[in-house]
Image (cartoon, helix red, strand yellow):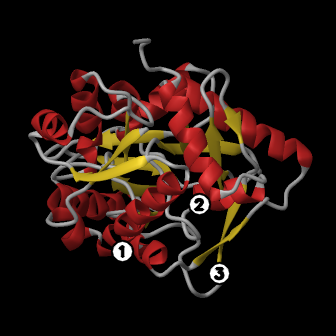
């Protein structure tokens, strides 16, 4: 096949705000390109620009676009790229605009989870310029409502009272110019679950993120993620009943948001050991030997090349017949 790997431009906002993530994205393009080449495909890499439709025309209409582009100007705009691919009428990997839009707006995703009968921690949203009002779900974690890679999350993001919440919310407004999400802080273990497939989706073995005592906050901050201070354990060491529940919630979240092909679902336990959905990453990292999803797939017996091939084939199944 003729495959175009669509990726970020590597310059601008992500290098300045998330240099660790920018490096990962460069390595991911190389990893995916190598895997597709090994599978015998003709691979072209293309940096995203607002002129995507014309760029695809100039590059020659592909059989498949392997979409790795995470956003233009902000990760909150990740859905715009999927929308342009949909308008171009090309087959592409991963979720469409609708699922990206729901998942990237964390408060909206949580509302969808609740409507589907799936557990998620209590929350409140404070838009820029709005005062704190009503009862807050304290203690709470305060974070941007539409960012990824733990951007905006620091040691001071967990607050115990209204005054602390006010400070954390003001910081989010100043730094990101978007609403702040105040989410009840869950003190239990944290897991991430990869999901593959469409009809039906299938959860792979859960991975636990173990935060080293004395070297982190006990939750993901932008610094903890950049320094790789959380140790992944896959398959997670947990009771079979919990493993089944994690899989059920991950598949339920994937379906509720309308995800396609692959995603990664973050889940954390509350003080009573009950799992709650945090969020869904509709475009999780695919860097070989580093990212969570390839590591989880490897633990499930799926090598990296087969993982990339599976994602490509799932996308092609949706392609309209010639």
Q: How many labels does the image show?
A: 3
Q: Residue at x 28, y 50 (%)?
A: 75
Q: Residue at x 10, y 42 (%)?
A: 50
C-alpha distance separating marks 2 and 1: 15 Å
Q: Residue at x 48, y 34 (%)?
A: 110
Q: Find numbered disc 2 in the image and state the secondary structure of the residue it sits on.
A: helix
Write down the residue under mark 2.
292
Q: Residue at x 69, y 51 (%)?
A: 269
Q: Relative to 253, does residue 241 appear above or below in the rendering? A: below
Q: In this view, does 242 lie to the left or right of 87?
A: right
Can I make out residue 216 in this image?
Answer: yes
Earlier-in-chain disc, 1 versus 3: 1
Earlier-in-chain disc, 2 versus 3: 3
Query: Residue 278's spot in the image, x, y percent?
Result: 54, 46
Image quarter of residue 78: top left
> Mark 1 packing: few (<14 Cα in 10 Å), some, or many (20+)?
some
Q: Do the residues labelled 2 and 3 touch (CB within 8 Å)?
A: no
Which residue is the extreme one toward the right? Answer: 240
Q: Are marks 2 and 1 in contact (CB under 8 Å)?
A: no
Q: Are marks 1 and 3 in contact (CB under 8 Å)?
A: no
Of residues 34 and 284, the one drawn nearer to the viewer in this rendering: 34
Which residue is the extreme one toward the bottom? Answer: 214
C-alpha distance separating marks 2 and 3: 18 Å
Query: Residue 135's spot in the image, x, y percent?
Result: 41, 40
Image quarter of residue 175: bottom left
Write down the residue under mark 3.
212
Can I make out residue 106 in this image?
Answer: no
Q: Nearer the viewer, mark 1 or mark 3?
A: 1
Write down the residue under mark 1.
20
């Amino acid at each position: 096949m003729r495959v175009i790997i669509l990726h970020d431009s590597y310059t601008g906002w992500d290098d300045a705000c998330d240099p660790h993530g920018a490096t990962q994205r460069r390595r991911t393009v190389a990893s995916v390109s190598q895997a597709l080449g090994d599978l015998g495909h003709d691979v072209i890499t293309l940096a995203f620009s607002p002129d995507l439709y014309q760029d695809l025309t100039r590059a020659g209409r592909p059989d498949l676009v392997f979409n790795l582009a995470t956003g233009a100007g902000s990760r909150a705009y990740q859905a715009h790229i999927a929308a342009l691919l949909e308008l171009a009428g090309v087959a592409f990997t991963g979720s469409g605009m609708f699922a990206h839009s729901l998942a990237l707006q964390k408060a909206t995703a949580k509302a969808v989870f609740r409507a589907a009968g799936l557990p998620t921690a209590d929350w409140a949203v404070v838009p820029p310029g709005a005062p704190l009002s009503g009862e807050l779900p304290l203690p709470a974690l305060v974070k941007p409502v539409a960012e990824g890679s733990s951007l905006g999350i620091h040691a001071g993001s967990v607050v115990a009272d209204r005054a602390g919440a006010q400070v954390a919310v003001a910081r989010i407004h100043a730094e990101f110019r978007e609403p702040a999400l105040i989410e009840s802080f869950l003190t239990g273990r944290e897991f991430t679950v990869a999901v593959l497939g469409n009809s039906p989706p299938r959860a792979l073995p859960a991975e636990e993120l173990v935060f080293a005592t004395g070297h982190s906050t006990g939750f993901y901050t932008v610094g903890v993620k950049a320094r790789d201070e959380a140790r992944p354990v896959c398959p997670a060491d947990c009771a079979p009943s919990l493993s089944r529940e994690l899989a059920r919630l991950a598949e339920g979240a994937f379906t509720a948001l309308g995800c396609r092909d692959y995603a990664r679902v973050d889940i954390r336990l509350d003080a009573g050991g009950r799992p709650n959905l945090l969020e869904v990453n509709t475009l999780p990292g695919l860097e070989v030997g580093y990212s969570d999803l390839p590591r989880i797939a490897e633990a499930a017996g799926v090598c990296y090349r087969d993982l990339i091939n599976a994602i490509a084939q799932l996308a092609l199944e949706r392609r309209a017949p010639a």
